[in-house]
Image: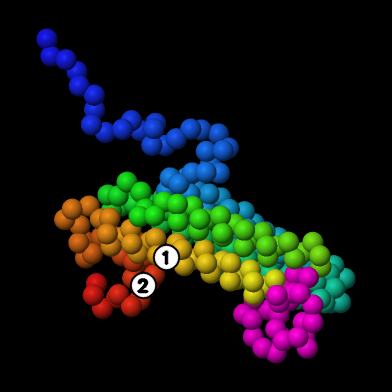
Amino acid sequence: MATATAPAYAPVESYVGESGLWSWLTTVDHKRIGALYLFTALFFFLVGGVEAFIMRVQLARPNGQVVTAEQFNQLFTMHGTTMIFLAIMPLSAAFFNYLIPLQIGARDVAFPRLNAFSYWVYLFGAIFMNVSWLIGAAPNGGWFGYAPLTTYQFSPGMNIDFWVLGLQILGVSSLAAAFNFITTIVNMRAPGMSLMRMGMFTGMHSSCRCSSCSPSR
């Protein structure tokens, strides 16, 4: 009688890891990190919506007294910053993490730990910027950051400091994700899948994340 041999591949359970909260906090699985990006971005999307709602209530009638002029400037700044840097941009990372390794035939991203690092840095930057509400020093210079509204003369407190440092932290997260995206797409495609055979979604990420490589695509 023929004897059964052990499979040459590892069971799926050993790759996915244990369940529970700790497994989500320590995961390097691209699908889980994509889900973390997605739910966090949707949460801050709701936060930005609440900020916009308060501004609309303030403007609903002349001489509204819902918030002060300074608080309105803070709401305006944080609403734009939240929607762009804490909601829309992380949603792009969420779809990349979940979909692109599947689309190109890769088991995971090129740097799984760097992938997890980029998410937690993004979360830290988002929390850092919103902590400014607790001390009454939320950014107030407009989310576009134009001078002279961002200068010490018009914002003498720590408001702009929170904004600048928060964006720098978020920039580190974006750079880490971008390096991971480019390396994964270029080096981990399935055999025979050239750059021109990739789907539009994958090709868009590889080109927009690395514009200097666009002539070779």
In the rendered image, residue 7, in percent from the top left (x then y), is placed at 24, 27
In the rendered image, residue 107, in percent from the top left (x then y), is placed at 32, 46
Q: Secondary structure at mark 2?
A: loop
Can residue 49 be seen? no
Q: Amino acid at mark 1?
A: Ala
Q: Earlier in the sequence, mark 1 or mark 2?
A: 1
Label 1 CA crowd tier, 10 Å (few <14, some 14–19, many 20+): many
Quadrant of the rendering where the N terminus is positioned: top left
Q: Amino acid at mark 2?
A: Cys
Q: Secondary structure at mark 1?
A: helix
**Residue bearing mark 2:** 210
Q: Are marks 1 and 2 in contact (CB under 8 Å)?
A: yes
Q: Is residue 138 magenta?
A: yes
In the rendered image, residue 169, in percent from the top left (x then y), is placed at 58, 67
Q: Residue furthest top?
A: 1
Label 2 CA crowd tier, 10 Å (few <14, some 14–19, many 20+): some
> Label for residue 212?
none
Q: Is residue 149 magenta?
A: yes
User: Residue, x 39% and y 32% (percent of image)?
Assistant: 14
Quadrant of the rendering where the C terminus is positioned: bottom left
Can residue 40 be seen? yes
| Viewer-proximal residue among 126 and 76 | 126
> Label for residue 178?
1
In this rendering, the answer to whether 144 lies above or below 10 is below
Q: Which residues are magenta?
A: 137-161
User: Residue, x 16% and y 15% (percent of image)?
Assistant: 3
Tell me: 132 left or right of 185: right
